Image (cartoon, rainbow, N blue to C red):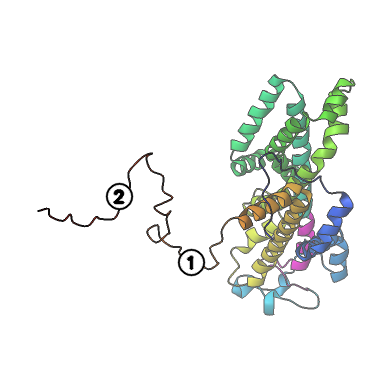
Amino acid sequence: MTPQKPGAGEVLTASPAPGGRQVWRRLLARRAAVAAGLVILLLALVAVAAPLLSALEGQDPTGYHNDLLDSAAGGVPTGSFGGVGAEHWLGVEPGTGRDVFARLVHGARISLLVAVGATFVQVTLGVLLGLAAGLGSRVLDQLIGNTTEVMLALPSLVFAISLMAVVPSGFPRPLLLTLVIGLLGWAGTSRLVRAQTLSLRQLDYVAAARLAGASRWRIARRELLPSLAAPVITYAAVLLPSNVIAEAGLSFLGVGVKPPTSSWGQMLSGATTWFRADPMYVLLPSALLFVTVLSFTVLGDAVRTELDPRAASRLRVGTARGSAGPTTDGPAPEPGPSSADRPGPSDASRPGPPNAARPGPPSAPEEATA
C-alpha cells in the first residue's frame, strides 16, 4: 500500500519532544550507543581512580627509571614491547623511563577534565548570551550578534596558541586550557540559543507569561529553558569530542600541559621521535584518544537523533514522497499503440458542417439518345 501524500491544505507538524524515560529506552535499544556509553563510563572510572590504579601497580607517573633504559641505543627501553613486565604493565617511556600505564591513566584525568570543563564554559556562556540576545532589546541583540560573528570568524587555534604562550608558566595549565577553549568556542551555542529563543517567544504560553507581568529572567528560567534543553544537550554532545581533540592538539604543539604533568597529547608530542624505536609508546595514547573521540561521537549522534523529533518526521515524509513516485528498479512499461494505430471515431460520427452534401455512390453512365 502506497502512503498518501499530504494534501495541499495539510501542515506537517513534528511530534512533541520525547520525555526522559522514552529517550533513555530508545538509547538502550541502540547497541552502538550502549557500547559507546560503556566505554565512556569505563574511561571516567579510570580517570577518577587514577591514583588508586597507579598505586596498585606500584608506580608513580613522575618517577624516573634510568636503569630500564639502554643508554647505548639512545635511551630505548630494554626488553620487548617497550619494557612491558610485571612491574611496568605497559612498559616505560623512552628517554625518561617513566611508567607508561601510570601516565596514561593520569593523562585521562587531564584530557577528560579539560574537555568537560571547556564544554561547560561554552554551553553556559552560549545559553546566557543567546537568551540575552533573544529576549533583550534590538541594540543588545545587534551587539551580541556582531560579537558572535566575530568569534566565529576568528582562527581559534591561532588565538589559543597565542593566549597559551603569553600567560605566565605559574598559572595552572589544565585550568588555562579549560578557559581558553571555553572562551573561544561559545559562539555556536549562542547562535543556536538565540534562534530558538526568537522562535519560542512567539508562542502563546510565553506571550501569556509576558502579559501576566513575568520578568524576562522568569520567562527565560520557567518558560524557555525547558524547551531549550534538548537542542543544547544535543549541541554539547557534539562539542565534547571536539574539545578532547583541541586539548590534545594544544598539548601536542607544546603550549598545553607541560611535563611532568601527563596528558595524551603531551605524550604524543614526546613520542614523535621514538615511533621507530618504540612503536608501543606511540600506539597506546593514540588508540586511547581515538577510542575516546569515537565513543563521544557515536553517543552524541545517538542523543541528537533521539532528542530531535523532527529528524524522524523528516525521514517519514521523505520516505513517503520517495515511495509515491516512480521507481527505476521495476520493469519498464510496455509500449502502447501509436497514434496511427489507435482506432479513431467513425466517419458517421465525425462532426461536419450543417446541410453539407455527402458524396454518394457513382452513377451509371447515361445512354445515348437517338
SS label for mark 2 = loop
The correct choice, above or below, for 322 with respect to 180 in the image is below
Q: In this view of the protein, can residue 319 be seen by the observer?
A: yes
Q: Quadrant of residue 91?
A: bottom right
Which residue is at a point 25% across and 55% down the rendered structure image? 362
Which residue is at a point 38% across and 43% down the rendered structure image? 352
Whole-percent x, y for residue 88 in the image: 78, 73
The amino acid marked with disc number 1 is Glu
Where, quadrant-wise, is the N terminus in this rendering? Answer: bottom right
Residue tagged by mark 2? Answer: 359
Q: Residue furthest bottom?
A: 80
Magenta stretch contains residue 294:
no
Residue tagged by mark 1? Answer: 334
The correct choice, above or below, for 365 with respect to 356 in the image is below
Q: Quadrant of residue 179?
A: top right
Judge depth for marks 2 and 1 and give the one in front. Answer: 2
Q: Which mark is residue 262?
A: none
Instruction: Write the start and end of the magenta stretch as one range.
Output: 89-109
Local crowd size for mark 2, using a 10 Å CA cut-off: few (<14), some (14–19), many (≥20): few
Local crowd size for mark 1, using a 10 Å CA cut-off: few (<14), some (14–19), many (≥20): few
Which residue is at a point 29% across and 55% down the rendered structure image? 361
The correct choice, above or below, for 54 with respect to 346 in the image is below
Whole-percent x, y for residue 333 in the image: 50, 65
Whole-percent x, y for residue 263 in the image: 72, 57
Disc on the earlier residue, 2 or 1: 1
Magenta stretch contains residue 103:
yes
